Amino acid sequence: MLPRKGPQPPSAKATAGPDGVVQNRNGSRGRIRLGVNFEGIREGGGTPPDPNASVGSRQVVEITNFKLAVYSKSGTTLLGPLTTQTLFSGFGGPCENAQNDFLGDPEVRWDSLAHRWILNQFASDPVTNTNRLCVGVSRTADATGEYYRYTFGYQTLPDHPKFAVWPDAYYVVATAAGSLFEACAWDRHRMLRGADAAQQCYTLPASTIPIGSDLDGTTPPPRGEPNLLINLGPTDDRLQYWRFHVDWTDQARTTLSGPQELKVAPYTRACESTDPTRCVPQAGTTQKLDSLSYSPMYRFAYRNFGDHQSLVVNHAVDARGGVGVRWYELRLRHGRPVVRQQSTYAPDPTDRWMGSAAMDKNGDIALGYSQSSSRTHPSIRVTGRLAHDPPNLMTFHETTVWTGAGSQTGSNRWGDYTSMAIDPVDDCTFWYTNQYQPADGTGNWNTRLASFQLSDCHAHHHHGHSRQHGHHRHG
């Protein structure tokens, strides 16, 4: 939410040639059939709105700067939109009292092992130099009910924080001023029962902010599997990663190892040679939008299929004279990531960025993103592929969730992230959340939530809520 300190310096150039994995045409499958598709939070405050949402046993929770709302799965509003600080009424400190300028970058996640909601945003008080992350953990599966509330302190503002659900901890990564990032583990088991909870942190050098592997589904990773942090590499043909393992009984055994490098197809970060923060064109205005191409995009979604473990992540790259979404499926081999497939989605020469990807229980991948060009307003689109389709291709025809009716005329900040989430009841329905402009302006944004399936959920599909108290006793 806070202004970035200008563009990141260009990374060292890889010697390899241009992007050789561009998908320059639509897939041969038809368009995706959308399920529900409804208006979310609008004009909640700051630009960018940081829209994201997660799905639980009965509800969908959306959060933005500075509001949250709870919906039924048919799109009925059950709570809100209300300010996120309502959650911290009576809690004191900046979590309750910070002004909007010093709040933001919120996230909401459903913990699929514990059937709980976790919400987070930063809060700071510049007068006392107090910097906090404010965390709420629902006491039940009902997001409209009561929350255990936590605050974790940091030396500098934990900007752009992203937390990830993992069995032994909630892992969070945030900037720690300039060329450093802070990686922390929060004591998940204690937080789930409302007990006092500690964090363990490392501060590391990196020019951008990695994100941690975030569990989907109800099969946990192998016992003791470290949380994997992913980042763009030091050169434009690499990703880099760290492995973070926390030990709550003996802190001396907590380890964060890395960075190590993973070779990928060469790419050029979007607008790297000009200015990534003023990159994406829009119809009817000279204002260009931030590509956020200097960081991997939320989420780094993890799934354990039993015979293999997969992770998907994306980032914005130059493609066909515009911006495309580079996406990866990584698999773990002896705990190390290897590239299973990779591609840059650019089926025509328009701009696509602000992606979010996830996998369903069948191994299908869905990718949502923003699309814009000098002739179109920013719009919300999705594509996807089935598990056994030819590799490195999004096989579904690009599908529009919502067409923006305006451009953002007074700010380059867009996003800063969107979210693709999975319905835990069937582990197969995707829910995508993103922003659009209903008219030209700044700060007059709206958000949209839409659901869809890529393949049949029949094997485990139950209507109603029969599985709410099912086989989820893992954590």
Image (spheres, rainbow, N blue to C red):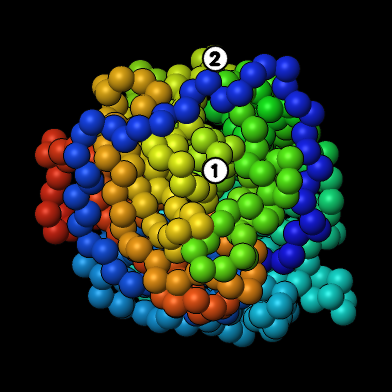
Residue 323's label in the rendered image is 1
Residue 337 seen in this snapshot: no
Amino acid at the residue labelled 1: Val
Residue placed most toward the observer, 84 or 237: 237
Amino acid at the residue labelled 2: His
Q: Is 120 on the left-hand or right-hand side of 464? A: right
| Image vertical order of residue 467 relative to residue 324, above or below | below
Residue 142 seen in this snapshot: yes
- Which residue sits at x=61%, y=65%? 286
Q: Is 361 on the left-hand or right-hand side of 214? A: left
| Image vertical order of residue 13 relative to residue 26, above or below | above
- Which residue sits at x=70%, y=71%? 123
| Image vertical order of residue 421 relative to residue 147, above or below | above
- Crowd around label 1: few <14 · some 14–19 · many ≥20 (10 Å): many
Cα distance between the residues tagged 2 and 1:
34 Å
Check whether the beta carbons of the residues at disc 2 and disc 1 lie within 8 A of each other. no
Q: Which residue is mark 2?
A: 334
- Which residue sits at x=40%, y=24%? 392
